[in-house]
Image (cartoon, helix red, strand yellow):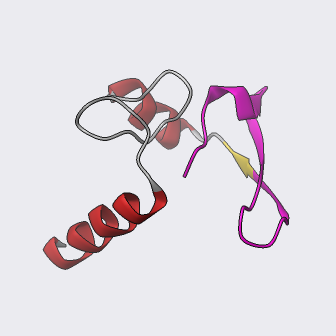
Amino acid sequence: MRVGRQHVKNRRGVIRAQKNGETAYFVVSDRLQAALDAGPIGEMTWIVGESGRPLAKESFGNEFRAACREA
């Protein structure tokens, strides 16, 4: 949820899962970078609400569910 540019160095990212504390690694692929460049994204988090502020995890879950239903 709260992933942003501060988690990435040389196109490689690392985050720690809030629920179980495990570390997850990811690569910022060309496709992901293009999506980020298209924006909008927040200053410290890539996923933000309409106000430009980070979403609470519950709000993100609701938005994700709605997008899945629409798809």
In the rendered image, residue 30, in percent from the top left (x then y), is placed at 54, 36
Q: Is residue 9 left or right of residue 65?
A: right
In the rendered image, residue 23, in percent from the top left (x then y), is placed at 85, 59
The residue lying toward the viewer, choosing from 42 and 68, is: 42
Location of the C terminus (image quadrant): bottom left
| Magenta stretch contains residue 12 | yes
**Bounds of the magenta segment:** 1-25
Q: Is residue 41 left or right of residue 68?
A: right
Q: Is residue 36 left or right of residue 6?
A: left
Query: Which residue is situated farthest in the top direction here?
Result: 43
Can you tell which quarter of the image residue 38 is in?
top left
The residue lying toward the viewer, choosing from 59 and 6, is: 59
Q: Look at 47% across and 60% down and name the residue there.
A: 57
Image vertical order of residue 68 relative to residue 24, above or below: below
| Magenta stretch contains residue 14 | yes
Q: Look at 19% across and 78% down and name the residue there.
A: 69
Query: Which residue is situated farthest in the left direction here?
Result: 70
The residue lying toward the viewer, choosing from 31 and 42, is: 42
Can you tell which quarter of the image residue 63 is in?
bottom left
Q: Look at 35% across and 59% down and name the residue there.
A: 59
Q: Is residue 4 left or right of residue 23?
A: left
Q: Tell me, yes or no, if residue 11 can be seen here.
A: no
Q: Look at 14% across and 72% down and name the residue there.
A: 70
